[in-house]
Image (cartoon, helix red, strand yellow):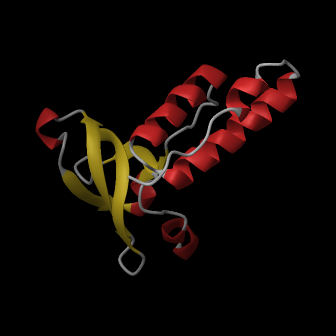
Amino acid sequence: MMQQELKWKKGDWVKGRTVNGELMHGYIVDYDANTGTVKVHVVACDRESTVGRTIETLGYLIKPFPVLPLSSDQLRSMTDLALVTYDRDWFMDLSSKLAGMSEDSGNDQSSRSNSWFWPAQR
């Protein structure tokens, strides 16, 4: 049981049920390994009044939200967003994923991703 609680990290997207049985999904705000509870900021739920709130539920009632692979266009859009928000770590992570996709596909569009740079500090 202890391993279940330890696998959650702040910011992880999850889906599952509230303690009242409503279906919901959102991201983890906090967790308590001692009690086995997880606080989730709900972005969608059967009960509309729960959307936008942070609820506390039991760790075994939720599971990781499935993550679909991103296309190169989606990665480029997210990289642009990382630049606009000055999130250097996210930018570097997305750029390396995009570079890996370009190498795997073998096409010459990698010159476009290699021309990106991190802007000067604001």
Q: Nearer the viewer, residue 113 or 58?
A: 113
Relative height, residue 42 to residue 109 (above, below): below
Q: Residue furthest right?
A: 106
Tell me which residue sits at (17%, 35%) in the image. Answer: 47
Q: Is residue 38 left or right of residue 109?
A: left
Q: Nearer the viewer, residue 23 or 102?
A: 102
Residue 68 picture location, percent across and down: 60, 31
Q: Please identify the quarter of the rendering in which residue 54 is found.
A: bottom left
Residue 23 picture location, percent across and down: 31, 38
Relative height, residue 101 to residue 93 (above, below): above
Q: Nearer the viewer, residue 57 or 40?
A: 40
Is residue 36 visible in the rendered image? The answer is: yes
Residue 25 picture location, percent across and down: 35, 41
Q: Residue furthest bottom?
A: 34
Relative height, residue 121 to residue 77 (above, below): below
Is residue 22 visible in the rendered image? The answer is: no
Q: Is residue 98 left or right of residue 104?
A: left
Q: Nearer the viewer, residue 93 or 80?
A: 80
Tell me which residue sits at (78%, 37%) in the image. Answer: 100
Residue 19 picture location, percent across and down: 26, 54
Tell me which residue sits at (53%, 49%) in the image. Answer: 90
